Image (cartoon, rainbow, N blue to C red):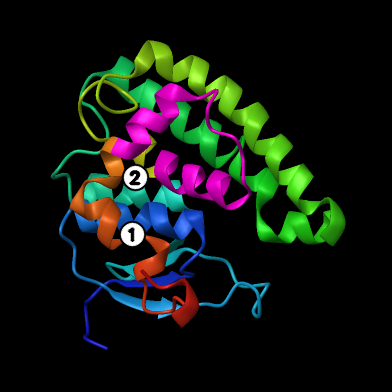
């Protein structure tokens, strides 16, 4: 490993890891990946990032740090009101939807209830998110600039698709997601294109 190169501890399918990979790609930051298998090493937290002599966990904290130390392109708007809106949407997804259908929680729910549980958690979160995005979105979640909120949206929609959630009631979410997935940074960081992606799930 190259000295001084940031290191990302990541799991191909972790939506939190994917958020950070998108930020790194958008900002053009070169980094090493250390794959952590969440299914096997359940206790390990991803993503975690070794950068500038410190280790940071929690995807939004990592993204905020990247934003403060490597500010271009901007992932948080300059306008304080818009910035608060970006954080609000990011938290809605990162705290309000994602934890309710992550691996460790689904294990507790039991195999036969997992799908129904995940679908219910995502649908109720998406009802709130769709309503919010109707008033905040332009081309993207907040206006016409890609922001941290978009980095949270795409991985969460991928989770929804994995759990076979009907996305018809969420046209705004669907539209923004489609626009984002056409962008290089979202494309190359996709779970089907990671060093630890199993062969059968590769693009």
Residue receiving disc 1: 21
**200 is within the stretch colored magenta:** no
Who's the residue at 73% across and 35% down the image?
120
The answer to the question of whether label 1 and label 2 lie on touching residues, with beta carbons closer than 8 A, is no
**Foreground pick, 13 / 113:** 113
Camera sees residue 57 = no
Label disc, if present, on residue 194 of the rendered structure: none
Q: Secondary structure at mark 2?
A: helix
| Image quarter of the C terminus | bottom left
Residue receiving disc 2: 64
Who's the residue at 23% across and 19% down the image?
79
**169 is within the stretch colored magenta:** yes
Question: Would you place residue 202 above or below residue 116 in this image?
Answer: below
How packed mark 1 is, by other alpha carbons closer than 10 Å (few <14, some 14-19, many 20 or more), is many
Q: Secondary structure at mark 1?
A: helix
75 to the left or right of 8: left
| Image quarter of the N terminus | bottom left
**Foreground pick, 74 / 21:** 21
> Residue 53 at x, y = what percent?
31, 71
Quarter holding residue 83: top left
> Residue 158 at x, y = what percent?
48, 49
Who's the residue at 55% across and 23% down the image?
169
162 to the left or right of 88: right
Label 1 – label 2 distance at C-alpha: 13 Å
Camera sees residue 100 = yes
Who's the residue at 34% across and 69% down the image?
193
> Residue 13 at x, y = what percent?
50, 64
Question: Would you place residue 90 above or below residue 195 in this image?
Answer: above
Q: Start and end of the magenta stretch?
A: 152-178
């Amino acid at each position: 490993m190259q000295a001084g190169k940031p290191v990302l501890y990541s799991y191909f399918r972790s939506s939190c890891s994917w958020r950070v990979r998108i930020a790194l790609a958008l900002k053009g930051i070169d980094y090493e990946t250390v794959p952590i298998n969440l299914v096997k090493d359940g206790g390990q937290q991803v993503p975690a990032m070794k950068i500038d002599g410190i280790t940071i966990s929690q995807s939004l904290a990592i993204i905020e740090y990247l934003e403060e130390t490597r500010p271009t392109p901007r992932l948080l708007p300059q306008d304080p009101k818009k910035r608060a809106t970006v954080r609000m949407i990011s938290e809605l997804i990162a705290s309000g939807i994602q934890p309710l259908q992550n691996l460790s929680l689904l294990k507790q729910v039991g195999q036969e209830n997992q799908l129904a549980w995940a679908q219910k958690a995502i649908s109720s979160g998406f009802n709130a998110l769709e309503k919010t995005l109707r008033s905040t979105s332009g081309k993207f979640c907040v206006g016409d600039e890609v922001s941290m909120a978009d980095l949270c949206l795409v991985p969460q929609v991928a989770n929804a698709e994995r759990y076979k959630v009907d996305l018809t009631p969420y046209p705004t979410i669907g539209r923004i997601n489609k626009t984002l997935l056409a962008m290089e940074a979202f494309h190359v960081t996709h779970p089907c294109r990671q060093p630890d992606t199993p062969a059968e799930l590769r693009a």
